[in-house]
Image (cartoon, helix red, strand yellow):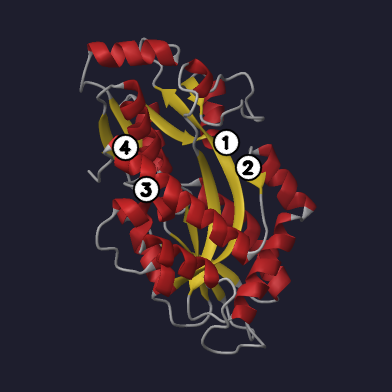
Amino acid sequence: MKDKILVAFVSLAFSGVVYAQTNWPNGQTVRVIVPFPGGASTLDSVVRTLTPEISKNLSTPVIVDNRPGAGTVIGVDATAKATDGHTVGAVANSFTVNQTLVKNLPYNASKDLQPVILMAKTANVLAVRPGLPVNNLKELIAYAKKNPGKLSYGSFGNGTTAHFAGEMLKSQAGIFVVHIPYRGQGPALTDLLAGNIDMMFGNLPDFLPHIKSGKLKAIGTTYLTRAPLAPEIPTIAEQGFPKFETDSWYGIVAPASLSKDAVDKVNSAINRALQDPIVKKNLSDRGIEIIGGTPAKFGEHIQSEIAKYAQIVKTSGMTID
């Protein structure tokens, strides 16, 4: 059944869709719903970096509408139910995690949404507060085993990459650490810096300045090979967990009712924006890797991510707190 759902979702990349809109966007404002608070996530930052160029490429205003909450479900649901013909939504890993993790989603991914483009991705990093008496993963695991349930890790919401990575580490390392979900990476990072939580997986570009200043200690990055932005930080894989790999990716989906013409125009506008020299430098300087491509390619990525996370949710026993 799930395979049929995935195939249906990917096929939306090719479907003609309900209404022809050959003159789209007809001078009307295009809205991008971001399921995180403004300024509180790399996804929001990527969208806002691209928005001026997207607006120029579409010859129409483009605005960002932040709809945070419920591990991105609120924002994605708002996208799925948009009927104005000029709304798309930004999504990240949590979109695919939620397909397995969240029971009774208010939207049907295969029927209500269609892929537009995979924009970019970043590495993640596990960081701890400076006062924690550990300097590497081996020491962290040993400390956690000596103090079961006394350590806490933050995430930017249930079902987000940080939640997934934290539960995966707990499962693979055999440790018990309390999960504290927040409404976005910003609030969670603030509490980590203040020492109110002990550790957190987060987007490397956002955490690196605090690591370099000594306000946080880096334990490991989450690519299988060292992250180009910070090659001095060892990976978690090389510290005894060779299959530990996560990243944060950022894409755009649209309501299923949006025409193929409109989807193709948004896809083209974003692909062009990603190749703008100023945008490329902005993202590259922050360790954000540009992807781009077709709606169909993003659909395939979504399919593989749903399958990957479904397996890890099952083996880790990950639940919503």
Amino acid under label 1?
Answer: Pro
Q: Which residue is mark 3?
A: 310
The earlier-in-sequence mark between 4 and 3 is 3
Q: Which residue is mark 4?
A: 315
Q: Position of residue 10 (x, y in %)?
A: 52, 66
Q: Position of residue 236 (x, y in %)?
A: 49, 23
Amino acid under label 2?
Answer: Ile
Amino acid under label 3?
Answer: Ala
The earlier-in-sequence mark between 1 and 2 is 1
> Given contact means CB atoms under 8 Å apart, are the residues at marks 1 and 2 in contact?
yes
Q: Which residue is mark 2?
A: 288
Mark carried by residue 205: 1
Instruction: Name the residue located 57 percent from the left edge and 71 percent from the top edge.
Output: 13
Quadrant of residue 117 within the rendered picture:
bottom right
Element on which disc 3 rests: helix
1 vs 4, front mark: 4
> Given contact means CB atoms under 8 Å apart, are the residues at marks 3 and 1 in contact?
no
Instruction: Name the residue located 57 percent from the left edge and 20 percent from the top edge.
Output: 233
Q: Is residue 60 left or right of residue 187?
A: right
